Every structure is written in structure tokens, then in C-alpha cells.
Image (tube, rainbow, N blue to C red):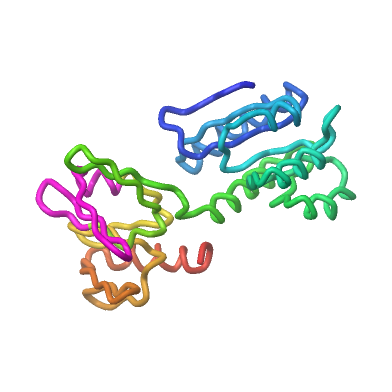
Amino acid sequence: MLRWSSKMSKFVIGICEDEKCVHGIIKNLLDKYAKQRDIQYEVIGFFSGMELLESKQKLDMLFLDIAMPGLNGMETARELNLRGIHYKIVLLTGKSEYVKEGYKVGAFRFVTKPIVEQEFFEAIDDVRSCLLGEEEITVYYNRIAYKIRLKDVYYIMSEGAQTIIYTKDKSYRSEKLLKEWDMELDQRLFIRCHRSFLVNLSKIVQLEKNFIYLYLGYKVPLSIRKKKRVEEAFMIYDTRYR
């Protein structure tokens, strides 16, 4: 098993492919993708279906070659399903006749061989869009750690040298500054709408001149200077990820 990682791994990608040269091609494409999309990622490499099945590694997505010796890609995907392991699987194939069978074993997308950069990038974009908001953040306060899914956060408010994170049922204090959250959180989902507020785009009901109305009756201020950028970000979210 091979492992490559960036400084702070977040998006974990598996490659199950028997040819070492294909691992190298995919790794190079992932490096290019990560630079263009400004993401941090980790890659776990497997050279057989059995090696993958024996691993306990958690993956966000998996590039799975169909034509492998021994346990092929279809058999590997079928066995993953039987074990209750449901990765976002992108099947690698040079033959279109596998498409119908691939969907039967839960394939999310297909990428044809030889791999074309645009198709490869689109497959990752689709997986990331599907997983948007499923990541967890860890909030520390008074030496206690709380884990919160991003999709459960409505907004984050600055209060002095701390921040307060509001969810559906409760709020959490954090020792992290708002500008730190702004740099860390996925900008497809969160945007700075005011010097003291970050808002989750998926929770917006309505934008008005000076306020943003959210589900559950939440209301946060909207800076005039940031209004255009918020409107543009919300439109992108609404058309691509809603």
C-alpha cells in the first residue's frame, strides 16, 4: 500500500489499480487538480482488490480499475457493498460495455482509459459536490473538543477573541478567530457576509438589503460592501450544489 499526503490531509482518495505507471499518472493529475482547486488531499494506493478489501482505511472516493488480475474491479465493488462499505467509486475502464454492470455495483462515475484530464477532473468535482457539507470540524473550548458536521452549521459569529458556532439545536464557543474559520472552511459553502459573521450558503432563505434570513428564523447582518459577493456565491451554490 502506498501513501501520499499534503500538509493537512482532508479529502482522502483511494486508487485501486494493478499497474504502477497508472498510479503515477493519477497522482500527477491529482497534484494538478489540487493546485487548481486549492484543496488539501491524501492518496492511498492499492495494487489489488484483495489489498483494498483487507485495508481498514476510510476513503472519500475510490478510483477502481475494472481489469485487474485476480479479483477484478466489479467483483471488488460487489464485495465492498456486501461488507457495507460504500465509497464514491469511480471506475476506470477502456470498454463502454462495463457501464451498465458498473452502475449495478454502485459506481458513481466512470473514467475511460487512457485517462483524459477534463473527464478526470469532472469526476472529482462531482464527488466533492455530492459530499459537500459532510465533513466535520473540531471545535475546542476549555480543553474540550466537539465535532460538528459542516452541513449542521448555520452561521459563525465573532465575539471578542472567540467565536460562537450556531447549529440547529445548540451553539458552541470556540477559541478560534473568525478570520481563521474564514480561511479554513470550504468557500463553496461558507462566505463572510459581515466583519463579524460567516454564513452557511445552504441555510439561506432570503437575501435583503442589510440582512440574510436563514432557516429556523435565524437572521444575520449583511454588509453593503460584501452584498454583491454574497449574492454571487449564493447563486453559484444554488445552481451547482443545491
Q: Residue at x 36, y 71 (%)?
A: 204
Magenta range is 157-182
Q: In this view of the protein, which residue sits in the foreground, 136 or 39? A: 136
Q: Residue at x 20, y 37 (%)?
A: 143
Q: Give coordinates of residue 210: x percent, y percent.
A: 21, 74
Q: In this view of the protein, which residue sits in the foreground, 78 or 157? A: 78
Q: Judge from the rendering whether residue 122 lies leftward or rightward of residue 217; answer left or right.
A: right
Quarter holding residue 188? bottom left
Q: Give coordinates of residue 122: x percent, y percent.
A: 63, 49
Q: In this view of the protein, which residue sits in the foreground, 131 or 51? A: 51
Q: Give coordinates of residue 207: x percent, y percent.
A: 32, 75
> Is 149 inside the magenta-drawn segment?
no
Q: Judge from the rendering whether residue 216 lies leftward or rightward of residue 15; answer left or right.
A: left
Residue 130 vs 209, above or below: the answer is above
Residue 164 vs 80, above or below: the answer is below
Q: Judge from the rendering whether residue 50 lies leftward or rightward of residue 29; answer left or right.
A: right
Quarter holding residue 50? top right
Count numbered badges in the picture: 0
Q: Residue at x 29, y 49 (%)?
A: 182
Q: Judge from the rendering whether residue 102 lies leftward or rightward of residue 123; answer left or right.
A: right
Farthest residue, direction right: 97
